[in-house]
Image (cartoon, helix red, strand yellow):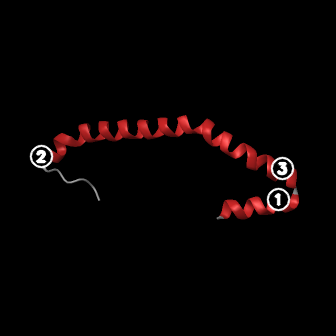
C-alpha cells in the first residue's frame, strides 16, 4: 500500500517519471527473479549444512544457549 501511495505522489509531482516507473517495474522484477531464486537456494543449502553440523550435538542431547 505504501508503494502505491508513493507512486501516486510521484504521479502528482512528475507524471512522465511515474509512467516510466510503471512500465519498467515488471521488467526489473523479471530481471531480479533469478537472483531471488538463487538466494532461496543458497539459504536452503546453508540450512542443510547447519543441520548436518549440529546433528551430533542434538543426538547427544546438548542444550544450546537460549
Question: Which is nearer the N-term, disc 1 or disc 3?
Answer: 1
The quadrant the N terminus occupies is bottom right
Identify the residue at horizontal 56%, vertical 39% (top origin). Answer: 33
Image quarter of residue 28: top right
The quadrant the C terminus occupies is bottom left
Give the tally of numbered discs: 3
**Secondary structure state at the residue bearing disc 3:** helix
Give the Cα distance between marks 1 and 3: 8 Å
Residue underneath mark 3: 17
Residue underneath mark 1: 11
Where does the image place residue 9, in percent across and percent down from the top left?
A: 80, 63
Give the Cα distance between marks 2 and 3: 61 Å
Residue underneath mark 2: 60
**Secondary structure state at the residue bearing disc 2:** helix
Question: Which is nearer the N-term, disc 2 or disc 3?
Answer: 3
Where does the image place residue 11, in percent across and percent down from the top left?
A: 82, 59
Amino acid at each position: 500500500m505504501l508503494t502505491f501511495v508513493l507512486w501516486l505522489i510521484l504521479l502528482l509531482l512528475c507524471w512522465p517519471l511515474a509512467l516510466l516507473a510503471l512500465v519498467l517495474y515488471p521488467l526489473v522484477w523479471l530481471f531480479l527473479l533469478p537472483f531471488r531464486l538463487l538466494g532461496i537456494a543458497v539459504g536452503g543449502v546453508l540450512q542443510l549444512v547447519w543441520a548436518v553440523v549440529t546433528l551430533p550435538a542434538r543426538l547427544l542431547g546438548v542444550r544450546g544457549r537460549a
